[in-house]
Amino acid sequence: MKKINFLSALLILFLGNVSAQVAVFNPAEFEKNEGVMMVWDYSPSRDSVIANITKAAQQAGKVWIVYYPGQAPVDTTDIRNYLYSRGVTPDSLYFIPGLTETLWVRDFGPMVMYGNFGQGSERFIMDMGYSAYNRPKDDSLPAQLANLWSWEKLDLGLQIEGGNLIFDGLTRGFASTRVHEQNPEYSPAFIRNMLIDKFNLMDFTFLQSLNNSGGGIWKHVDMFMKVLDYETIIVSSYPNHLPDYPVIEQNVQILESLSNHFNKPYTIIRIPAPPKADGTWATTQDDEMRTYTNSLIINNTVIMPTYGLTEYDEQARAIYSEALPGYKIISVDARALTILGGAIHCVTKEVPAEHLIRIVHRKVTGRQEYSPEMYIYSNCESNDALQGMWLYYKVNDQEQYNKVPVYMACPQNIGIIEGLKPGDKVLYYLEGVSVNGTATYPAGAPAAGFTFWFDTLTDIDQNEAISSKLSIFPQPNDGSFTIINGSCEFGFQLRISDGSGRIVYIGQHQSGDRLTLNLPPGFYLLKAQSGDKVNTGRMIVR
């Protein structure tokens, strides 16, 4: 059977009007967002920070500015003119009237999630308790926006700020132990179980608060850690003479002991926290806390705080660039914010995309064992009908991406990169397309992607000839099929593996044999070996 016929059969079998529903969940910051929300503070020093963030963020999505419709003019002309004078354009810029008192929208603003309220998966607002600061207008912003946008609103039932909640999008949430202090009427176990239930998680992890590193009473996790993707966490590092050094190192040990969605340890990247202007670091709770983890990821862009410290700022930029290759890394001076206890993340609030579509994928990176074919496994979740999935890849110095279909198999979708040779280096990304939108993983694609490579031929058996001359028909089939091993005149050992790589059959056969196996529907790899010759083929069971 020719390759084009095989691919066509797969597409006919698995693509088309495929739809998926997901449970209530809070997407991770690095997943697809419609845009970011900020509050206009009516303070010249801080307004310049908001303007700089707006300029950076509107390259990646919408920007909503919440303005005060009371004493300030309802007309936003002055705000617009100020933003335009700082390089902001009218593109993707929107204004929302809202009663607020401060600019810390991360903490009191709406936590936008996906849920089903009878009309399919849609966005709604989770409202966290924020009543301890005598700022009722800030506390009421989620309700104001729910009324304005006609969205459902649910109450979390705990006192907690948004800066102290971080999610990996699939399995786990993170917070500091300050949550226990804020909710003394509940036990830590009760709080943990409530957060797991409300956010539909598998687990929730509390990390020890940093009590001597500045930042004020809030002691939020976003001041010392950030989740970069489903598998990677970046964490601040401090000089070992500081009082919170053992605390942060203990937190790192906890993070290293955890398993991610793919049942593997998280990759932990360290990023040095910068000193204050006088060259020292905070040693008390009320001092200034500077951090690079308090950044914002908005689609293909990272907005990173800087502090006028060239050596530290450039080092942080390099760490982000290496961790998120292909993303735009844009610096914004955050010195006007850290003296008040926050930074870039604290004054921003991302809003997930209107139509949920995301790709869940364990990335393939770094050195890999050589194979002429690389199988890229993934799942695509969407609240609309899926039209298809695609794998894009470049090999070595190719300028243009190759585009191949991703087969909708069970339990995971499969994309195949074929014709690889020892020494090859591959850059790839995934795309999902629904009737109402697209999503890529990573979100920074096509500029961003995942890279893996093989060593040269010296690392494999040079006597092993690998080809793809094994034919299986009919395609697809119901588990009854004929195998033709074109280069083998004698018997061979046949191994069949399922989509997860598990061997499901081993037997001795001749070319032309008819097999009838009790195989569940899915994608299978067949490998026929006779002496030093290995031929492979692929098969779909309906």
Image (spheres, helix red, strand yellow):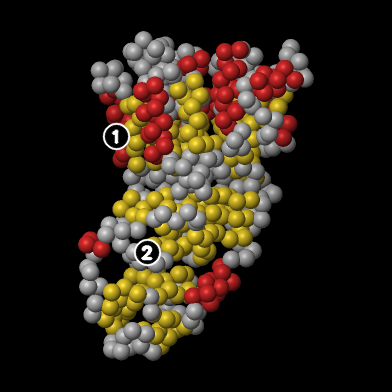
Dot placed on the residue nearer the N-terminal end, 2 or 1 = 1
Work out whether residue 21 or residue 413 is closer to the camera in this orientation and state it.
Answer: 413
Q: Is residue 500 above or below residue 73?
A: below
**Which residue position holds label 1?**
253
Q: In this view, does 426 lie above or below 238?
A: below
Q: Residues within 10 Å of mark 2 (few under 14, many from 20)?
A: some
From the viewer's perspective, is 438 left or right of 178? right
From the viewer's perspective, is 419 left or right of 298? left
Q: Can you give x and y, in whole percent of width and height, for residue 114 in the image?
A: 60, 43
Query: Regarding mark 1 in the picture, which secondary structure is present there?
Result: helix
Work out whether residue 394 or residue 12 is closer to the camera in this orientation and state it.
Answer: 394
Query: Regarding mark 2 in the picture, which secondary structure is present there?
Result: loop
**Amino acid on which disc 2 is placed:** Leu
Q: Can you give x and y, in whole percent of width and height, for residue 241 in the image?
A: 25, 18
Residue ID at (51%, 48%): 446
**Can residue 154 be seen in this snapshot?**
no
| Res 429 label | none
**Amino acid on which disc 1 is placed:** Gln
Residue ID at (68%, 34%): 91
Question: Which quadrant of the view contains residue 517?
Answer: bottom left
Q: Is residue 7 above or below residue 412?
A: below
From the viewer's perspective, is 469 left or right of 405? left
Nearer the viewer's eye, disc 2 or disc 1?
A: 2
Question: Which quadrant of the view contains residue 94?
Answer: top right
Residue ID at (43%, 33%): 226
Instruction: Give the distance between the C-alpha atoms of the residues marked 2 and 1, in whole angstroms.
Output: 38 Å
Q: Can you give x and y, in whole percent of width and height, for residue 171 in the image?
A: 45, 44
**Which residue position holds label 2?**
420
**Can residue 86 be seen in this snapshot?**
yes
